[in-house]
Amino acid sequence: MNIGEFLKANYPGGIKEYGELELDGIIRGYFVKGINGDELYIPNKSSGNVKMLSYIPGSSGSIEDAKIIHDRLSIDSPEYIISIADDATDKEDCIETGYNIARSLGLNVIENVTLCFSTSGYLGIKKTETFEDNHPEVKSTVISCEPYNGGTYSYERTDSRDGLMKSNSQIIFIAPKVGFHINMQEEIKKMTESGMKAYFLGTSYNEGIHIMTNTDVITSGMIDYILDFTDSFNTKPNENVTYELIKYNIETKQYESMAYNDLTSTLDSIKIPRLEENNLDSFEVKEDLSKYSEKYKELNNLEKKEIPENSNYVYAINEMNAIRESIKNTSFINSYHNQTFRDDINIPGMIYNHLNTYYDTVGNLLNSLTLETNSVLSLTDAITQYEKEGNTGEIVLDKELKGFIPMDPPTEKEVC
């Protein structure tokens, strides 16, 4: 089942729209819109690490506020996941949806950007904090554009900020430097004093041009920049706007200008795991003989064909014996072991799953080659008997392929 088929069969609540996004005849990714109104784009990537954009629109909903994202998907599908909430309530938890679908596909989300706008400006922080409580290994950046409804999220309680802090995540508020209804400088000061990474990207817009802040973030390439898919972004997406990125310095008690590359470097800090918070159990990694080593063990018992006296077919018999000796000495037979892990979806378990498939293929090819040598040796034996003292030898054709070992059929999941 490919990614598209999986999405159609497993998107929560079912889907009402599905599309395959192509560029130059190559499928770049798959898009679904659920019956619940949420949307998800998955790049055409079969395994490994991925990054994600989680978008929560304002009161106008995703059809209007996410239009720029939809436009990009149609012409230049990105290499990261995009999960879009239907409206400002994000009732289906778009971040968790994108993460869970990715995991089911064998993809490992390592970084997330939550872009929230207006009515969802503080809800996006709350949703990301909850997500980080559950998945602290994922780094997040919350970009909150001209936020409203400040009572939706409070950083004053430890349990309302520890998820973001433990995951080394950050918050970037974007709003007009002058005339905005919230004092954003005071907001990042309080958050910084509480231990959070919070920054303010002030714009020269006035409050009357509300939608443009949301639009600029998407069109400027800022998201791709933070997710490290580009080395820069357009810091002047509109000729009428200028940006200023600032932080609050606890030591000097002053606001300071920041370089834009600080937005990415802060995500690269080394985290020391807190082992006392991990739920460790008694699971042990063990080593067992691979079932494919057992399956092809008879290849270790191939007999050498003796050369009849005065035979004219010494070359053929010697060559077949050499091939059989090489097959007999193949190292993985009776010696290849698997280590047992919790599953075969993630590394390292998935490595052994792929190796097992490889050795099943190798064993099947060696088995087929053995049958070929049997046929050649049978033919030379028959001819030798025919030539010896006028006896007629019977050439036996193995029409039933006796001794053939078929490969295992492919399965969606096979635990090592």
Image (cartoon, rainbow, N blue to C red):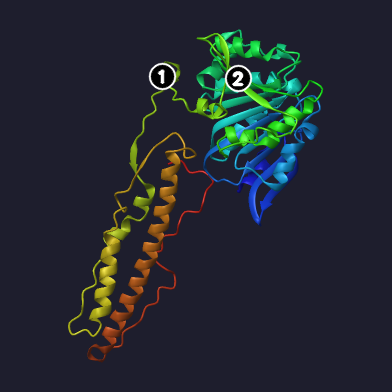
Q: What residue type is labelled 2?
A: Ile
Task: Count neighbours of disc 2 (C-alpha within 10 A) and say few if under 14, some if 14 to 19, many if 20 or more.
Answer: many
The picture places residue 196, in percent across and down from the top left corner, at 55, 15
Residue beneath disc 2: 246
Relative placement, left or right, of 63 versus 122 is right
The secondary structure type at the circle numbered 1 is helix
Q: Can residue 34 be seen in this view?
A: no
The picture places residue 364, in percent across and down from the top left corner, at 41, 60
Residue beneath disc 1: 275
> Which numbered circle lies on residue 176?
none
The residues bearing labels 1 and 2 have C-alpha atoms spaced at a distance of 34 Å
Mark 1 or mark 2: whose residue is earlier in sequence: 2
The picture places residue 140, in percent across and down from the top left corner, at 57, 26
As drawn, 326 above or below 154: below
As drawn, 263 above or below 50: above
Residue at left 37%, top 63%?
367
Residue at left 38%, top 51%?
292
Q: Which residue lies furthest to the left in this view?
A: 309
Task: Count neighbours of disc 1 (C-alpha within 10 A) and say few if under 14, some if 14 to 19, many if 20 or more.
Answer: few
